[in-house]
Image (spheres, coloured by chain):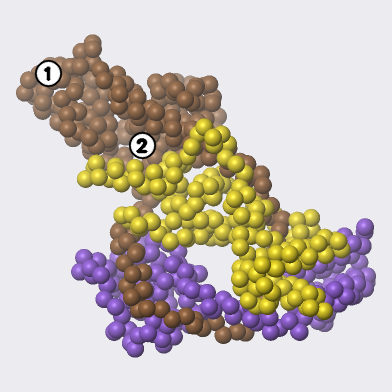
Chain colours: A yellow, B purple, C brown
Amino acid sequence: MEIKDKLGAIEAILFASGEPIEIYRLSEASGVDAGTLPSMIRLLNERYEDCGSGICIKKLDSSFQMCTREEFAPQVRAALETKRTAPLSNAAMEALTIIAYNQPVSKGFVENVRGIDSSSVINNLVEKGLVEEAGRLDVPGKPIVYRTTAVFLRSFGLSSVADLPPLPGQSDLVLETEEEFVDRELAEAKQTE
Amino acid sequence: MEIKDKLGAIEAILFASGEPIEIYRLSEASGVDAGTLPSMIRLLNERYEDCGSGICIKKLDSSFQMCTREEFAPQVRAALETKRTAPLSNAAMEALTIIAYNQPVSKGFVENVRGIDSSSVINNLVEKGLVEEAGRLDVPGKPIVYRTTAVFLRSFGLSSVADLPPLPGQSDLVLETEEEFVDRELAEAKQTE
Amino acid sequence: METISFKLEVFEGPLDLLLSLIAKHKLNICDIEISKLLEQYLLYIDQAHEQNLELAGEFLEMAARLIYIKTASLLPQPEEAEQMKRELEGALIEYSLCKIAAKTLADAFVGGNIFVRSPMKIKADMTYTLVHEPERLAIAYSAISMKNIKSEHAKLHVENKINSVVKRRIVSVMTKVVHILRQLYDSGEVYMDKLYEGVTDRSARVATFLAVLELTRHGRITISDDNTMIFFKGRKNGVDRSWRSKTSSEQ
């Protein structure tokens, strides 16, 4: 059977790679057209659902990843002998939220909103794989900018940042954009020169 | 369904553990009696077989392990190799150039210039064969130093590192050498003692 | 003053503390009463100091900012104070939105309940195969700011940050004290505006203000009823050193 084989190949690749795998890479390796892939993944997910499988395939941005279903968390935790992961601290959640809604942003932007040094908080988010480097800003100091990762999406049950919950009162209270922030910083730097 | 849930739990555990898992541990974590486990595993394997799944469960001594089916090995390998054709990220390119222009240098040196933790980036460069270890520095901590490889030269069409393109405005970019960097770090370490 | 037996709440930063004070004292976030906020803020800083609570330098910077807004609002042209107050209100609103959004996002956290697996260990040749122009290297290299070295270097001394902020403040306040006294030695009186003339740097303005406060507190100067003039009170031989050392030890 053609389709059966393709589904098997997709499953094997997702299982073996462990990490999220981009659609184009999955398509290249499995020989399944990138346009058809989403419907194939849907077929697999339906099958898992029907037989109450312990696994499922999640779409994270333009990647797919195989993971366990939430409901089996207690059993998996018992087997791996891991403790419940401690939730993120308030400081980490604040920094993560600022990065998620304004990405890509520099550390300076995060610090400006929080009003306090955020280096260690951001380093911690990088270590946890929730945010990653996304190049540098072409302004004096060439600051590194950060964006959220597939781990972030998976951890918060999102399939893309477009799915982030709307900001509270966004309509009447607009956050300063990274551009405006940089402009202002530059203007201030000039003044003090 | 009772059985359905148990099968799901067994699947989730086997999926997440990666390594072979002892029968008694699997039994404990899933809540399935050790005596019944083999027949449950058989049920799962039959299901996988029926739908031509890409995964299966193997028994090794007194352990079980979930793996991909042999027949999909070519696709799995192909997926892994698609990683090779992925271009270097900005972060990787930065780390590579710092190593290229200042070799041999330690990870600490790269991190100091980039202003961010660069462990995973450097490991990635080593995996791709672009840089390699070149001994250790004779300072406390004995950090590993890195240099570029023949693969690096080939990838950038160079015949030796002496042919590296000159840096624009190099005169005003006075970078401290690895030696100066180490000296400074040592001096600082002494100060904080 | 009665002893404080309760444990002080710890805040994420000065904005967090301000928001809590605004909520506690039912102030309007869109039109803050600066005097009341400043009073409560300084009270917290004092209590934190008494309980040896380590506060980041940003807390002191915010105190200076509030003091500055309050002073500037007493000046005949309070436009700058208004502007700074609006900026502060904007920052507070933005930060409170961020906190709400962070809470919503935190509620959606499922990361602890979903497990993934590490990649299967398969022997494969991972050697890089792409070919690039050598110029890519020079371009990538110059994209890194060499300033990073210095700024990172500075960050190694974060632990000294509070000290250095305080030290810097003493020095600059003392400089301004001397500066003001010099002007007063000559004429015995000076316009308040003149002290701020040409001083655009925020910290220098704050220092000038604190210097005036310091001198008033020690009875060296008096200020006219309409806050425009400063008068020198009693000419002595040189500056009385006793309060100077006291000021530094207080800081």
Residue A65 appears at what percent x and percent y? 67, 65
Instruction: Identify residue for label 2.
Output: C61
Given residues B15 and A42, the one toward you in this image is: A42
Residue C239 shown left or right of residue B104 in the figure: left
C-alpha gap between disc 1 and disc 2:
30 Å
Residue B185 appears at what percent x and percent y? 33, 65
Residue B99 appears at what percent x and percent y? 37, 75
Residue at the (63%, 64%) spot, across then down: A63
Identify the mark nearer the N-term, 1 or 2. Answer: 2
Residue situated furthest top in the rendering:
C225
The reply to whether label 1 and label 2 mark residues of one chain is yes
Residue C189: mark: 1
Q: Using the rendered image of the protein, determine whether residue A81 is visible from the camera's viewpoint.
A: no
* Category of crowding for the residue at label 1, using alpha-carbon neighbours closer than 10 angstroms: few (below 14), some (14–19), many (at least 20): some
Q: Are marks 1 and 2 in contact (CB under 8 Å)?
A: no
Q: Is residue C68 above or below residue A191?
A: above
Residue C23 appears at what percent x and percent y? 54, 26
